[in-house]
Image (cartoon, grey):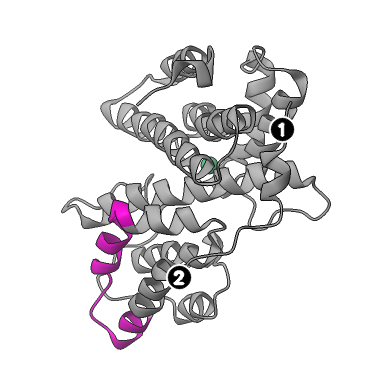
Amino acid sequence: MLHQSELGDLAEVFEAFVARHCQGSAEDAFNIELKREHSWQVMANARAIAESLALPDAPRRLCVAAGLLHDFGRFPQYMQYKTFHDGKSENHARLGARHLRKERACAGMEARARRLVQAAVILHNRRELPRGISPVLRCLAEVVRDADKLDIIRVMAGHFSSPDASNPVVTLHVKEDPQAYTPALLETILQGKSGNYAAMQWTNDFKILLCGWVSQLTFSRSRTLLDEHGHIHRLLDTLPDLQAMRQLQEVVRTQLRTPLPEPACTQALRQWQG
Ligand SMILES: [Fe+2]
């Protein structure tokens, strides 16, 4: 359900921006729509996480805005390069922040809120958040990062479990093979470390990397949302029938059932008043 007051004029600003970037073939329209839908789903996830943290209105609005806008850069990225692969084009998070400023997309927000949202957009795709950022920004960025991971798992689970799993833009150009995977990447994930997109060669590597995100989630609610939505289970079901994959499935299912302590930065966001 959409709470208009939470977004102010952002819904219109976002939709108008997307519409300007939706041009070209049916395939182009499909890929743009994928990111438009993703943006709204990330907003919904960010709101659900914010509610689980009992955030008051002002910080909850930051989460909702940053969730909707986090992939603002995807639209100009696709229009210019016809790919979502940052390495083959440019960093879509920085591109997004640049376009947010150029479009004055957050003009309806207070300056402090605007700066936080733009910073969270820039940070959303970093492998690790930098040291030294404020606890408020850290918490906001973590909400967006969790919300984003949950929805990418939805998109990819749908993609990998559909019979026509061959859109190279969605799979970031990895190779198709029912059994092949990169053992070193699996080992990294089983050790609870985050995988690197650059280590992916096969579609199974992409699935393994996504499974590794469960251990990287920050908020307890993110784990329960993932479990409840069911997409992670669909993704696990698409892994090849190999002993190594059964181990991965067990590790992930255990993580999904394990609650997380509230991170220390949460209190700072809860107390943020703009
Ligand atoms: Fe992104």
**127 relative to 236 in the view: left or right:** right
Which residue in the structure is indicated by mark 1? 116
Which residue in the structure is indicated by mark 2? 258
| Mark 2 residue element | loop
Q: Residue 105 at x, y = what percent?
A: 61, 16
Residue positioned 66% across, 47% down in the render? 139
274 or 178, nearer to the observer: 274
Q: Residue 18 at x, y = what percent?
A: 45, 20
Amino acid at the residue labelled 2: Thr
Instruction: Look at the picture and state if 131 lies above or below 245.
Output: above
Look at the image and give the residue range highlighted in magenta.
228-247
Quadrant of the image occupied by residue 101:
top right
Q: Residue 47 at x, y = what percent?
A: 48, 36
The answer to whether residue 73 is seen in the rendering is no
Instruction: Look at the picture and state if 195 lies above or below 141.
Output: below
- Marks 1 and 2, how far apart at CA: 31 Å
| Mark 1 residue element | helix
**What type of secondary structure mainly makes up the magenta span?**
helix
Amino acid at the residue labelled 1: Leu
Residue positioned 40% across, 29% down in the render? 36
Quadrant of the image occupied by residue 216:
bottom right
In the displayed orientation, state which residue is furthest to the right: 132
Which quarter of the figure is the N terminus placed in? top left
Residue positioned 55% across, 46% down in the render? 53
Residue positioned 38% across, 78% down in the render? 248
> Along the polypeptide, which appears first: circle 1 or circle 2?
1
Disc assigned to residue 209 = none
Instruction: Look at the picture and state if 22 lies above or below 59.
Output: above
**177 relative to 63 in the view: left or right:** left
**244 relative to 238 in the view: left or right:** right
Q: Is residue 242 magenta?
A: yes
Q: Is residue 126 magenta?
A: no
